[in-house]
Amino acid sequence: MHEIWKYTLDDAGKVVASEAITKNSKKTNARPFVIEGTQNAKDGADRLRLTWMNGDYYYWIVNTTYKQAYPTSIMAECAMPVNETNAEGTTISIDLAMNASNYTGDQLKFNNDIVWGVNSKQYSYVRINGKEYTSQNVLGTADSWQTENTGTTGGTWLSKTKLGKFNLTMTADGKYLTIYRNGIIDQKIEYAGSVSKAKTAGGATIEAQELSANAATQSSIKNNMRASLDKLD
């Protein structure tokens, strides 16, 4: 088990103080990262300066020996703000099954001129009134690397493994449209409208969907989707 420590050095490079950032961790802590440009951040519970990985860190990449590689979460030294109260608005939660042979293009259409789909590079997008917003996250995994013995492939990138089934949730609170993939925020877009139930527009299949008359919090989305994901698996 690895813990994160903070050391303070004097001008001569001598350690003059130390502080345990983590202790008694149930999972290992790895690869601490100091965020660039935060050196003048004020001390306090809301200071975001240091992040690290916490979980089962087996290896730096998926391969035949370490098929899970690093199933970890990202931790921070500060308490992240959490809104535990559902806001006014709407939420649509969709249990979605993708079709590997018809994976790209528009996949879902909503009554209020919202379209969700996947582009040719396997990034999901949302189109609102004709304007497209592309996610920075691939709709896939690196599981294809499980066939390789090492972390290199001679300079050739393997194809990304396409997702099968997952939960897609959208919330609209009158200010933002927030898209969650399996409870994790994927995109947040300025949007004053609402969300509705979806209809399929491509190869994806809607296994189930539920429309709620509030903008659900992230924690409630995670709690509500777990039972659905168990059914999908």
Image (spheres, grey):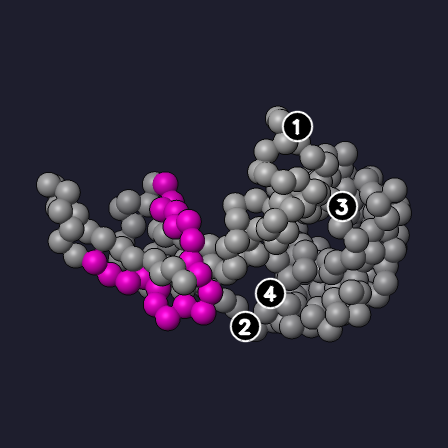
- Nearest the camera: 115 or 26? 26
Residue, x 71% and y 65% (percent of image)?
A: 90
Residue 90: in sight, yes or no? yes
In the image, the segment drawn in magenta is: 18-36
Between circles 4 and 1, the one closer to the viewer is 1
What is the x, y in percent for residue 63?
A: 62, 45
Residue bearing the label numbered 2: 84
Q: Amino acid at mark 3?
A: Lys
Work out how far the residue at label 4 is from the one at label 2, CA to CA, in angstroms. Answer: 8 Å
Amino acid type, residue under disc 2 in the picture: Glu
Q: Contact, CB < 8 Å: mark 4 with mark 3?
A: no
Q: Is residue 178 left or right of residue 228?
A: left
Q: Earlier in the sequence, mark 4 or mark 2?
A: 2
Mark 3 burial class by Cα count in 10 Å: few <14, some 14-19, many 20+: some
Residue at image coords 75%, 64%: 93
Residues at discs 2 and 1 in contact (Cβ within 8 Å): no
Q: Please tell me which residue is depicted at 47% across the width and 59% down the height of the picture.
A: 54
